[in-house]
Image (tube, rainbow, N blue to C red):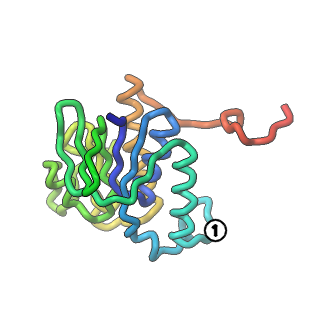
Amino acid sequence: MVDVAIIGGGPAGLSAALFTAKNDLETLVFDTDQTWMHKAHLFNYLGIRSISGSEFLMMARGQTRDRGVELYEEEITDVETTGDGFTVSTDDGEYDARYVVFATGAKRGLAEELGCETTNEETINVGLNMETSIENAYATGAMVRPEEWQAIISAGDGGAAALHILSKEKGEHFHDFDTPSDVPWLDRED
């Protein structure tokens, strides 16, 4: 059983994966590579002057792989609760995880089939930490917002979900804050 299974490999899913894997949780990401990001060009993403959505994804995937995330280009066909987590199914197999993060853009079907509550606006109902009505199941990005479908908002949602998972794992509120001394590849002349 892995710690975290993330369904969707856009900004929300990869952001969540980066935080969880960087902090030693075994993390899998499942994606069909059909994200809206391939149609996007980022001018309004903080820290990025101009980049195509596809180039952004390539860089983000590399960054998550560098932290130990396993990326699978497989479609999820079902998600079920188990006694100690979730079973995520594809046509190629089943994967057990203690937490699941839905990062599927506006596609809410898998979360709804799991039993996650929806709002009057037909979005998945979450709290500020992105946790759904199903314990240890999280939803992010366009599936929780009726209108604000921005890559940077989705990335923040993924980060919020990951920090909540990490807080549960650590048993206290967890902050992920790095300093230059935490970055092993920076050249320093201390």
Q: Position of residue 176 (x, y in %)?
A: 52, 36
**Outermost residue, top side:** 171
Residue at image location 19% in from the left, 43% down from the top: 133
Q: Position of residue 78 (x, y in %)?
A: 20, 53
Q: Position of residue 154 (x, y in %)?
A: 41, 57
Residue at image location 29% in from the left, 43% down from the top: 95
At numbered mark 1, what does the secondary structure look like: helix, strand or loop?
loop
Q: Position of residue 63 (x, y in %)?
A: 57, 51
* Residue highlighted by disc 1: 49
Quick check: 9 above or below 164?
A: below
Residue at image location 75% in from the left, 42% down from the top: 186
Residue 139 vs residue 35, the one in the foreground: 35
| Residue 104, picture quadrant | bottom left
The quadrant in which the N terminus is found is: top left
Kind of residue sitting beneath label 1: Arg
**Outermost residue, front side:** 92
**Outermost residue, right side:** 189
Q: Is residue 62 left or right of residue 174?
A: right
